[in-house]
Image (cartoon, grey):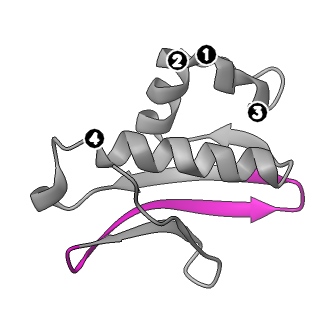
Amino acid sequence: MDYKLIDNTEGKQYEYHIDGVIAKIEYIRAKDKIYLTHTEVPKELEGQGVASALVKDVLNDIEKKELTLIPMCPFVASYIKRHPDWKKLVLKGINIA
């Protein structure tokens, strides 16, 4: 499914607006680094692949902006572990377990 990724810089989160609810990944941005801290998908959207699609779009945006990723959110870290090509964005020395 294609959703429109919104970088809500004021709210410090990436968002999908779907059927009146918001799926989001919260972040902290510090110069050329971005810390993804929390992923949240409303109950009515669970089990539809929304969180994985959101992580993928966010990682594409991070790559486009040439930022270094520090994945603090367990869901983001597990996504990167399942899709190791994205490790190229992760700050060197951080182990994705």
- Disc 3 is placed on an element classified as helix
In the picture of the structure, the residue carrying the numbered disc 3 is 89
Task: Give the residues in magenta.
Answer: 19-34
Tell me the CA gap for discs 4 and 1. Answer: 19 Å
Disc 2 packing (10 Å; few <14; some 14–19; many ≥20): some
Q: Quadrant of residue 86?
A: top right
CB-based contact (under 8 Å), mark 1 and mark 2: yes
Q: Is residue 1 left or right of residue 97?
A: left
CB-based contact (under 8 Å), mark 4 and mark 1: no
Disc 3 packing (10 Å; few <14; some 14–19; many ≥20): some
> In terms of secondary structure, what is the magenta stretch mainly?
strand
- Disc 2 is placed on an element classified as helix
CB-based contact (under 8 Å), mark 4 and mark 2: no
Residue placed most toward the observer, 8 or 12 = 8
- Disc 4 is placed on an element classified as loop
Q: Which amino acid does label 1 sit on?
A: Pro
Tell me the CA gap for discs 3 and 1. Answer: 10 Å
Label whose residue precedes the other's in the sequence (4 or 1): 4
Q: Which amino acid does label 3 sit on?
A: Leu
Q: In this view, does 57 lie to the left or right of 9?
A: left
Label whose residue precedes the other's in the sequence (3 or 1): 1
Tell me the CA gap for discs 3 and 4. Answer: 22 Å
In the picture of the structure, the residue carrying the numbered disc 2 is 81
Tell me the CA gap for discs 1 and 2. Answer: 5 Å
Residue 84: assigned label: 1
Q: Is residue 17 left or right of residue 71?
A: left
Label whose residue precedes the other's in the sequence (3 or 4): 4
Name the spot of residue 74 as percent of width and height, x first. 44, 35
Tell me the CA gap for discs 2 and 3. Answer: 12 Å
In the picture of the structure, the residue carrying the numbered disc 4 is 49
CB-based contact (under 8 Å), mark 2 and mark 3: no
